[in-house]
Amino acid sequence: MVRTALAVLVIDENRIRAAIIEAGLREAGHERVTVVHDVTGIARRIAEIQPDVIVIDLENPNRDMLENMFQLSRAVKRPIAMFVDRSDQASIEAAVDAGVSAYVVDGLRQERVKPILDMAVSRFNAFSRMARELEEARSELESRKVIDRAKGILMKSRGLSEEAAYTLLRKTAMNQNRKISDIAQSLVTAAGLLGPAEDE
C-alpha cells in the first residue's frame, strides 16, 4: 500500500489541534485528509468517508468519551492512532484491548504525526495478520478433528485401517471436487443422524 494514497480521517473537537495534525499529515504527503470536529454520529461519518486510517485527538478525555472511542475502535477495524493529553494505566490497557494501534499520551507535535501514523498502520497490519493466521490455525485444527472422527466412523463401520479410511475420504473428496474436511463433516453429520452407536 502506498502511504501517500491513504485516506486519513482526523477526529478532533479542538480546531487548532486538528489543524496541527492536518498540517503534519499534509507535510508528510497525505493529500486525502478529512477533519471532523463533532463526534456526534461519528460511526455513520466513518462509513461515509471510508478512511484507511483514523487519527483521534482527545484533549481532556473523560471515562465515557474514552469508552465511546474504544467501542468505535473495535467496530471500525481500521488502524487508529489516538492522542490524549493525559492518561492512566486503566485507560492505556483499555486502549490496547480495544485494538487502538497507537496510543500517544501528551505527544501531539506536528513532526510526530507521520511516524506515529506509520506505526499505527504497521501495528494494525501485523495484528490483523496474526489474527488471520490464528483463525486459519483454529480452522485447520477443527478440520483435523472432524477428519479424525470421520476416519474413526469408517474404521468402525467398514473395518478399515486408519490409512484406508483416510484414502477413502480423500478419494471421495477428489471425485466430488470438495475438501476432505467437507466430506468428513458430511459423514460425521450423517453418522450422528443414523445413531450414536456409529459415532462413539
Image (cartoon, rainbow, N blue to C red):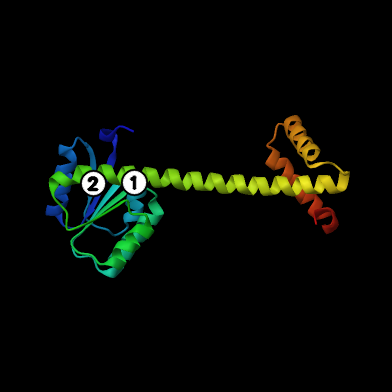
Displayed quadrant of residue 32: top left
Q: Position of residue 152 (x, y in %)?
A: 78, 48
Relative placement, left or right, of 50 versus 82 is right
Vertical placement of residue 62 versus 109, above or below: below
Q: Which residue type carries mark 1?
A: Arg
Using the image as rendered, state which of residue 137 and residue 132 is in the foreground. 137
Using the image as rendered, state which of residue 143 and residue 164 is in the foreground. 164
Q: Position of residue 120 (x, y in %)?
A: 29, 46
Displayed quadrant of residue 39: bottom left
- Provide the residue designation for mark 2: 116
Q: Is residue 52 visible?
A: no
Q: Quadrant of the C terminus?
A: bottom right
Relative placement, left or right, of 14 versus 191 is left
Disc 1 element = helix
Q: Residue at x 82, y 58 (%)?
A: 196
How far is mark 1 from mark 2, CA to CA? 10 Å
Disc 2 element = helix
Label drawn at residue 91: none
Relative placement, left or right, of 92 versus 60 is right
Q: Residue at x 17, y 46 (%)?
A: 112
Vertical placement of residue 135 versus 176, above or below: below
- Provide the residue designation for mark 1: 123
Q: Earlier in the sequence, mark 1 or mark 2?
A: 2
Q: Position of residue 46 (x, y in %)?
A: 33, 49
Q: Which residue type carries mark 2?
A: Ile
Vertical placement of residue 40 versus 111, above or below: below
